[in-house]
């Protein structure tokens, strides 16, 4: 995906569904929930995009499908990560298989904890490896808790890194530039343009899989759309063209915005953005995790940060 020159870090706003459904919070607010994304107060059920680029009509934009990237085991045993962005005060951080270089916690255990305070446990060991640049106003929370927000962990078994969100007060928004695998009986929230898409998969008889998809609109006059497909129905194209299996009549959606595929080896449905104009954003909430591959553009609530694999 290409980014608009007007891409802004101050454009993080709020996404809401109708009053009887879930909602997504972004912007300068903390997300106050423990088990699900909930509706906030003082809003009038308006959708607006938590985005990395501006919305445009893409009638004249050619949409080309990327080749599916291989997410197999990485053979580079010296693989490191470079982290940059406002979240780290503009600093460049390097993570190795042992952990963060110049870590405060300094455990060299393959884990790097990012948090909002520098408190210690009863042994005098710091809870966090790095204190991020986040304006958290609740001083009692800062003083009485570990303040851990997310963790980047290295796996020796698969020789790769994963990003884990550990704190229910926050969401991480990841711009999808690779394929996303789904797990059984778990809800995934994906923003496509200004549309909120909720996805879950489950087993069904005959060793097949079923995927359920809910589409919610910003425009309250439009009813939500519900879809159910089997793994034999793939590819499931999503977009503004009527020939798509999931047709979404919304100007923020590209004609061929995304596609749902199926992996026989992983026994999992997959979502992939098709170089859409306004992109697809995975919303990570408490206890969610994702494998780190290539370059990832993310936001912790409204603050941008980047993660990149380096040799």
Image (cartoon, rainbow, N blue to C red):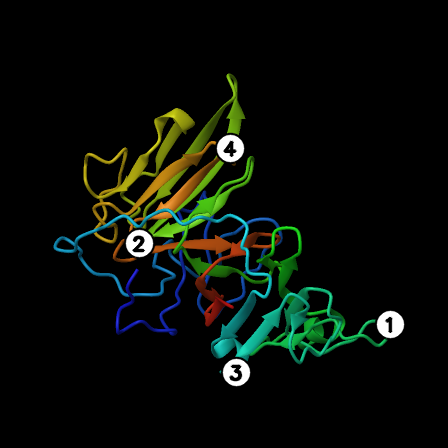
Whole-angstrom CA distance, mark 2 to mark 3, is 31 Å
223 relative position to 147: left or right = left
Residue 292, percent from left and from top: 52, 58
Q: Is residue 255 visible?
A: yes
Quadrant the N terminus occupies: bottom left
Label drawn at residue 91: 3
Within 10 Å of disc 1 (Cα), the crowding (few <14, some 14-19, many 20+) is: few
First reached walking from the N terminus: tag 1 or tag 2 = 1
Q: CA distance from mark 4 to mark 1?
A: 44 Å
Residue that extends furthest to the top in the rendered view of this protein? 206
* Disc on the earlier residue, 2 or 4: 2
In the image, which is nearer the foreground, mark 2 or mark 3?
A: 3
Q: Is residue 23 above or below residue 136?
A: above
The local crowd at label 2, few if under 14, some if 14 to 19, many if 20 or more residues have their Cα within 10 Å, is many
Query: Where 311 falls versus 205 (above or below)?
Result: below
Which element carries disc 4, helix, strand or loop? loop
- Precedes in sequence: disc 2 or disc 3: 3
- Which disc number belongs to residue 267? 4
Q: Earlier in the sequence, mark 4 or mark 1?
A: 1
Marks 2 and 4 sit apart, C-alpha to C-alpha, by: 28 Å
């Amino acid at each position: 995906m290409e980014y608009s020159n007007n891409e802004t870090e101050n454009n993080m706003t709020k996404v809401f569904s109708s009053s009887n459904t879930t909602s997504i919070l972004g912007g300068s607010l903390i997300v106050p929930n423990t088990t699900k994304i909930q509706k906030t107060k003082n809003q009038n059920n308006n959708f607006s995009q938590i985005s990395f680029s501006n919305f445009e009509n893409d009638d004249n934009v050619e949409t080309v499908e990327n080749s599916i990237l291989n997410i197999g085991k990485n053979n580079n045993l010296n693989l490191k990560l470079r982290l940059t962005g406002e979240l780290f005060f503009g600093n460049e951080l390097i993570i190795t298989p042992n952990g963060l270089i110049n870590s405060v916690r300094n455990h060299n255990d393959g884990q790097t904890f990012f948090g909002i305070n520098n408190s210690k446990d009863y042994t005098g060991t710091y809870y966090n490896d790095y204190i991020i640049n986040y304006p958290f106003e609740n001083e009692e929370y800062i003083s009485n808790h570990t303040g851990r927000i997310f963790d980047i962990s290295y796996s020796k078994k698969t020789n790769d890194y994963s990003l884990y969100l550990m704190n229910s007060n926050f969401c991480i928004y990841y711009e999808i530039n690779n394929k996303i695998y789904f797990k059984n009986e778990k809800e995934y929230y994906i923003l496509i343009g200004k549309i909120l898409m909720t996805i879950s998969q489950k087993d069904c008889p005959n060793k097949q899989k079923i995927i359920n998809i809910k589409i919610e609109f910003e425009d309250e006059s439009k009813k939500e759309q519900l879809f159910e497909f089997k793994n034999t129905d793939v590819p499931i194209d999503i977009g503004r063209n009527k020939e798509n299996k999931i047709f979404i009549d919304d100007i923020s959606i590209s004609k061929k915005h995304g596609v749902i595929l199926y992996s026989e080896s992983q026994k999992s449905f997959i979502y992939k953005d098709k170089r859409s104009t306004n992109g697809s954003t995975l919303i990570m909430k408490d206890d969610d995790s994702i494998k780190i591959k290539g370059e990832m553009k993310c936001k912790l609530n409204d603050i941008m940060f980047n993660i990149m694999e380096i040799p």
